[in-house]
Amino acid sequence: MDKKELLELGVVEEGKPKKPTPRLPRREIACQDPKERIKNFNEVALGYTLKDAVYEAMRCLECSKPRCVVACPVHIDIPSFIGLIARGKFEEACEDIRKYNSLPAVCGRVCPQENLCEAACIINDTNPKNPIAIGRLERFAADYLLSQENGNENKIEIRHKTPFKVAVIGSGPTGLTCAAELAKMGHTVHLFEALHKPGGVMMYGIPEFRLPKEIVQKEINYVRSLGVNIETNCIIGKTIPVSDIMNEFDAIYIGTGAGFPNMMHIPGENFAGIYSANEFLTRVNLMRAYEFPKSSTPIRKPKKGVVVGAGFTAFDVVRIMLRLGADEAEIVYRRTRKEMPGRGEEIEHSQEEGAKIRELTNPVRFIGDENGFVKAVEVQRMELGEPDSSGRRRPVPVPDSNYIIDTDLVVIAIGQTPNVLIPSALKNLSTRWGSVINVNRETYMTSVPKVFAGGDAITGAATVILAIRAAKEASRGIDEFLKDPQKKWYPQAFSEKK
Amino acid sequence: MELFENFLKTNKEDDVKREFEKALNLEFDLKLTLQDVLNSISHFNSEDNFPYKSGIFLSAFAFKRNCDDVLKVENGIEIDYFGSFLKSNQITVKGDLGNFTGAFLDGGTLLIEGSIGDKGGYSMNKGKIWIKGKAGNHLCHFMRGGDVLVDKNALDFVGNSMVGGTIEIKGSSGYSLGYRMVGGEIEVKDLSWDLIGEEMVGGKITVRGHIGKELCQNMVGGIVFLNEEYKDTPKGKTSGGKVVFMNFRKR
Amino acid sequence: MFEIVSKKILAENVVEMTIKAERVAKAHKPGQFLILMNYEHSERIPLTIADSDKEKGEVTIVFLVVGFSTNELATNFNVGDKLYSVVGPLGTPTHIENFGKVVVIGGGLGVAPIYPICKGLKEAGNEVISIVGFRSKNLMFWVQRIESVSSRIIVTTDDGSYGMKGFVTNALQKLYDEKEKIDRVIAIGPPIMMKNVSKMTLPWGIPTFVSLNTIMVDGTGMCGGCRLEIGGETKFVCVDGPDFDGHKVNWDEMEIRMKVYKNQEQQILEEHNCKIGLR
């Protein structure tokens, strides 16, 4: 881009100081019209234009003690990359983010920034509810670089090559990040994925209209360009026995995520037409059932869909139902809107698209027709009682308040727990609640030597960014372990008696 | 410098203390300044072990020479373990340092006019570290005494398992403040994000600004002072200790 | 990878295929299955592994052309073509030890997967009596192969065109009437056959195991699409199975869950046929 074009966008000229404009309102992101977008699966938020991005970047104060950086789980140097955008160095901005986070285009889209960096932004003090749109700028920077030629290729030279080999199991956000970090440190990394495409939850869980799959594959190509060897169609513990992996590699990182759906355990749950959220999402996102019959995986198209639960997943499901042509789709939640764990923006978007929310309602039974398909769900009214240990008020059933909602498709989205495949294949692995792996909080090593774990596999279902954070810390632990496996590197090695 | 080249080639021993003692036995030319030594060894920067060995080498030299000194570190030179085991010198560093800066410090002062990496002040005992820039993760892990002052931000796990001493952060701190802290004091002037005082046993934490979620989970003892503006933040299960919301006067 | 090494039409609509998949072949144990995909946007098809050659790194599958994807696999793919994806071996292997006298029943397409089971049981020192049932003589396949790994074989056909006339259950009844001391029954085939076998052996008190092939997506316990009520508990066929105690399976539910996508299957086949007509 030549200098004149850049100046027209309003960027700071080289050598001149920046005059921040924090008092201006934050720039809203352009979205597809709700009436249009429920007919397609294209991305809802269209992203910033160059002009929007420069405007927003100019608002940043670039403070010397940035609060956003400490609130970001992976501590991206936010003022630095925003400064680069404001100076018209769009490509460098993304390279700058990649030092800290290998998946910027994904995080710019799915991170709950309003609870993290944007909540901490100092502009909130003087211009309330108008923090810098950090997430949107991150997304802009990443998209700009990815749209360039060779944008998804690594440009940093990897200095020290080590003789160590690491196996990373699972190619979700945590596996990809850990693999990328270890590759940057010079280790040889093999990344194993059970499905036919790498990306984990970014491929099967998050729908196309929130995170285009093309973007995910571009980010994965960047990780590949770091020298990571990605092997799909490979289930550790089935295709390759765990003992082989243990013998072949110097360290193993388990990033298998939380992929085992919780069910409600109420009568009639196995009627046809009742899906777990995982199955529904996998069919639609990974297998592209919405393009049926062009892609050959089928899905039942609902007329009146019901979703149980109100997390991120539930909102994704309800929006997919509307896009599949449902006349009505509603969320059934046992608490109220205030307690919903879903992200504010998602709730708003789903409302615009016509999704309904039935608060303080809990299903007690599913009713099927003579062919075994679900035709209705019996629900019970709830009221909020005393707060529980998590600080949320516990719902209590109201006696004799049952009624029936007609439906032809039910999706149960009440959370996931980690898959049991790996814990059952690895003996002596310490777990809690059956499948969540216990690790050392500083090194991320499990109870089995040289096996590390991170992401949803050690916490239960959480967000992408927390999985990335765990991966980064674990990669440091793995690096230290590889360089010095004999040393008891915490903390006894350093104890000196006085 | 041949001395350093040989030292660089020796095997890395499992204990930093022994490594340091090994360096102390070297025959340094004590007429040189710290800066001269760094200049003469800096061309080894691309070697694998350089950060680790150079820091210990420089610290041993300073320990033996026992004079106040100024060191200018250029960008791109990584030095870990600088200032470890020092007892009485006052050293000013201009530039950034790597991990384990001031580890096992036993007295004296380190003034760093730049930023430091992870695990600064690891297990320090006495003395003072003043960091004018940023500090990385795990600041003052296992700290037993002394003072640490950070002018800008510190990242995660500040004062993890600390026993004594004081930490003052003029900017913000990241996740997990005072995890399993037993004694000593931490004061953060601005924001501190999630996980304050988790599994805390004793000591004192003050956070004047914004706070994140998951406050004082499984806290057993000690006291935490927080800004009363954030009174509604839900508190985790505690079995002891005190959380006080107070009105900090605006400066 | 995943090259098709050989392809044989065994009978009408029954195809045998050998695929190069070294890791799958190496790790395969009797009773396990694999999931394959034809193209990038194809369905994931779960198929039981009928045989594996660990040295050559090849697996053999036998499948019935029932729906769109199996049709696609049978018509579009020939020797030398490559499949988009093959993943496996999945599921828990069949429990094999020296039981004594085991009756292994295969019905229709279920004849293929009993081959590795019979082989495994025989190697473990069991006396294997196999009963294989087909609709008629022209649909028969692999009879000799099964015979080679069992001590006795009974062939039944529905129309009586070969062997014994009737269903596999008739043959089982006959064995029971002959006062054979049966220690275990393993049955693989269409749900209705497995259901009837299980019903039959329940009063006799013979442990009966069946291998279920439900609708699946990922095969690793992620989606729960294969869930089924087994002995009052919800189990996932892909990780807890595919072998289950036939007396505990809720067969009515199994039938319902197999029919979920009947309409869509019709739609895609029609659409496909329309396109062929236009050409």
Image: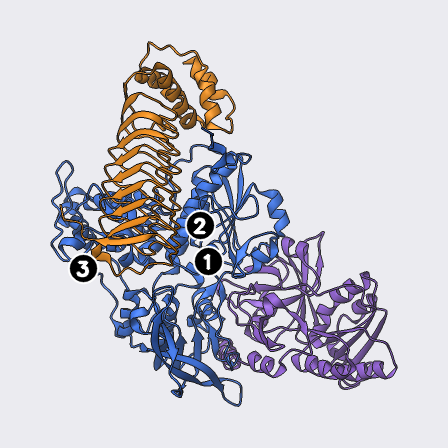
Chain colours: A blue, B orange, C purple
Residue B45 x %, y %:
39, 24
- Asked if badges 1 and 2 are on one and the same chain, I answer yes
Mark sitting on residue A326: none
Tell us which disc is closer to us: 1 or 3.
Answer: 3
Q: Quadrant of the N terminus of chain B?
A: top left
Residue B107 x %, y %:
33, 25
Tell us which disc is closer to us: 3 or 2.
Answer: 3
Disc 3, disc 2: CB below 8 Å?
no
Give the Cα distance between marks 1 and 2. Answer: 9 Å
- Asked if badges 3 and 2 are on one and the same chain, I answer yes
Q: Nearer the viewer, residue B47 or A480?
A: A480
Q: Quadrant of residue A234?
A: bottom right
Q: Nearer the N terminus, badge 1 or badge 2?
A: 2
- Determine which residue is flagged by label 1: A200
Left or right relative to C99: residue A52: left
Left or right relative to C221: residue A86: left
Q: Amino acid at mark 3?
A: Lys
Residue B152 can be seen in this image: yes
Q: Nearer the viewer, residue A469 or C119?
A: A469
Q: Secondary structure at mark 2?
A: helix
Mark sitting on residue A129: 3
Residue A196 x %, y %:
51, 59
Q: Amino acid at mark 1?
A: Gly
Disc 1, disc 2: CB below 8 Å?
yes
| Residue at image point 37% right, 35% down | B144
| Residue at image point 46% right, 58% down | A200
Q: Nearer the N terminus, badge 1 or badge 3?
A: 3
Residue A226 can be seen in this image: no
Chain of residue at mark 1: A
Mark sitting on residue A176: 2
Whether B17 is drawn above or below A324: the answer is above
Residue A437 x %, y %:
51, 54
